[in-house]
Amino acid sequence: MDQGEFLESAVRDVLTADEAVLDERIGYAALLLATAGAAAEADRLVTQWQALTERPITAIVPDQVRARAWAMLFEARGTRPDWAEELPPLDLDAEERAHTASLLRPVSDLDGVLGDSPAAGVVSSIAGKLAPSRPDKLRSAIATHDLPGWAVLAAEQARPDVATLAASRALAPRLTAGADPLGLGTEWPARCADALVAALYERYPPKIGTWSELISRILRFRGTGTAPAPATPAGIEATERRLGLRLPDDYRDFLLTCDGLPGDVVFPRLLGTGELRVVDDVVVLAEPAIVLLARAGDRWHAVEVDPVFGSTAYPAFRALLEHHLALLAQSA
């Protein structure tokens, strides 16, 4: 599997494809990550997908083999994440017997032609008569518990069948033990999850209500700090007289919710009304001075200055804080 091509294609589909394709991409990527020993990254991806799309888990675990794969991985991990509560419990002994039988079945060129249609079972039962059947090397490697051999063969495929691999009860403990069992590299799973979660947030911006809800969510994701008390309308007006300008309405709403905000490791401390200052017609909102309000004509923009990546202008101060919340959520 070419990891760069896979991730580029997956991100493109998350951003632009219809929901069915998007769900399939997320479901495959999450199972790939879990099978590669990156359970935390897989759980993060599924949890963010579920929170943003509000679709049922069956949308990304649509068939028996994938449900079986997750069940075997959960057993090997010894834990079942919260997002999996929607999945029905399985009789793992029965699933193991069914999976072993499926691994020993020769494959035909007609397999999968009709998908999950009612006629598919009929075609499958007579596939050996209609088209040549042959042993499948990948399934044979799974049946003999040859994980290195499977990884070598799978490396030649654009999207190896990780569901059939993970559904093997004997191999699941080796997959969940970490140590990069699929040879994807120790850093790639986090990059994959980061990129796909970021694409999900771009496609489905989180629905945020009031200013109080926005600030509460930021502090909840940070896990530390509390919001200062709100500024008063009189205090804001006094600050505006001192600065010689009227602050934009959405920033005034922020100050009426909390008069400033503590910083974190990636975002500066936002100043209270008594600390605001104007430098060259720009209102400095933070310490250090990397969050600003700048006016272009009769419109204000919030600006975040990054000495490495350059400055980013937002159409409103709230948009800047929503972007900060999205970054916090992606890394949660």
Image (cartoon, rainbow, N blue to C red):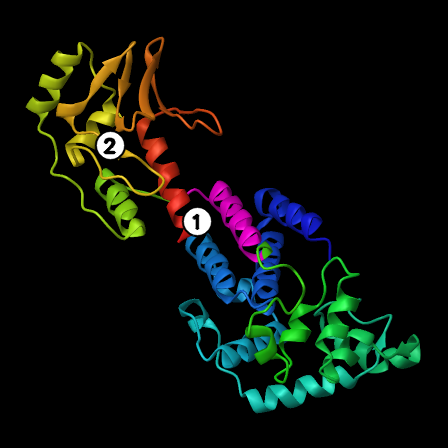
- Residue 170, percent from left and from top: 63, 85
Of the pair 13 and 55, the residue shown nearer to us = 13
Of the pair 170 and 81, the residue shown nearer to us = 170
Q: Residue at x 29, y 10 (%)?
A: 281
Q: Does the magenta segment cover residue 18?
A: no
Secondary structure at numbered mark 1: helix
Q: The C terminus lies in which quarter of the figure?
A: bottom left
- Name the residue tied to disc 1: 330
The amino acid type, in three-letter code, at marker 2 is Leu
- Residue 257, percent from left and from top: 17, 36
Q: Quadrant of residue 8?
A: top right
Total marks placed: 2
Q: Residue at x 50, y 50 (%)?
A: 197
Q: Residue at x 46, y 71 (%)?
A: 84
Specify whether 325 is left or right of 84.
Answer: left
Distance in Å between CA atoms under marks 2 and 1: 22 Å
- Residue 304, percent from left and from top: 38, 27
Specify whether 264 is left or right of 5.
Answer: left
- Name the residue tied to disc 2: 270
Please give the range of residues in magenta. Answer: 189-205
